[in-house]
Image (cartoon, rainbow, N blue to C red):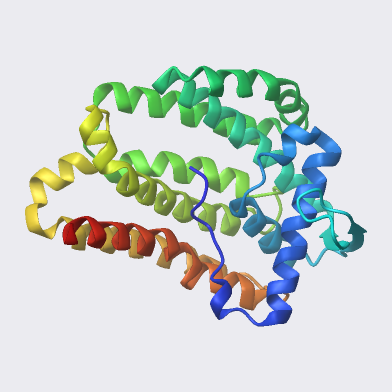
Amino acid sequence: MFGYINVNRKELSEENQSAYQSYYCGLCQSLKEHYGAKGQVLLNYDMTFLVVLLTGLYENENKQESFICALHPTKKRTCFRNETTDYAAAMNVLLAYHNLVDDWKDEHNYTKRTMANALKKSYDIAAQEYPRQVQALEDYLEKLEKYEKAEEHNIDLVAGLTGEMLGELFAWKQDEWYNELKTLGYYMGKFIYLMDAYEDLDKDEKKGAYNPLHYLKQESGQDFETLCRLMMTSMISESAKSFERLPILLHADILRNILYSGVWSKYEYIQLKKKKRTKK
């Protein structure tokens, strides 16, 4: 589920690139502080988007810190941290833990089980602080398992589960912004599910694994690629509309870069791979 909410660095100004990197590094430092080195391994750009989004909306005051990065030790790095950074770090842990457990169930990958066991204590710490979000995650996994066992054909129904879950995670507080953040996360979640299913389709078909896009492919024939693109465009468009309704000025350029361009980077990468295979 990770790896789809990316920034398009080519279209960002140097100032915005620097700010975005500082939030990314801030998330890394929060993961390290609260969950140790194993928390840092979970770092991803998806939750960096959440940090920038919530910081822009709530206009939290950043604490700027300098630190030495183990991966880049030659010079000091700068990071931005605030309340939302710690929240996103907790959501990062919750999602990663369930993702590892799900991979273990699906693939019986012992490495994933070992990683999940190592993360359990960190998961319990985050879960205790955010019971609403944990409940959303557990409900999502329970319903998803039922749909997969039933081989549910309705792609919108299945994708909606990810939307409901991510919407609850995006809604940091139950305040005046709760419904709009939940809506933004809902459509973002559906987009992510569709993109993930699209990326995994060939692999799932070879393994005989469940993928609701398989049924759409059978039914739509030559229109399949167009329909997939239209569905994903519709979902991310609704997410962008929700963003535009929020009174966000701080880092709005970075957020628009992600919503209107960055989220398509994986899709473009998949198309390039397909073209290379066709040429062979």
Position of 81 with respect to 46 (left or right) is: right
Q: Residue at x 12, y 59 (%)?
A: 223
Closer-to-camera residue (40/157): 40
Q: Residue at x 77, y 56 (%)?
A: 25
Position of 268 with respect to 94 (left or right) is: left
Q: Residue furthest bottom?
A: 13
Above or below — where is 244 with respect to 140? below
Question: Horizontal and vertical percent for residue 35?
Answer: 79, 33
Closer-to-camera residue (31/156): 31
Question: Horizontal and vertical percent for residue 171?
Answer: 64, 50
Residue 249 seen anywhere in this rendered image of the structure? no
Position of 199 with respect to 80 (left or right) is: left
Residue 99 seen anywhere in this rendered image of the structure? yes
Above or below — where is 178 with respect to 150? below
Question: Horizontal and vertical percent for residue 145?
Answer: 38, 24
Name which quarter of the figure residue 179 lies in: bottom right
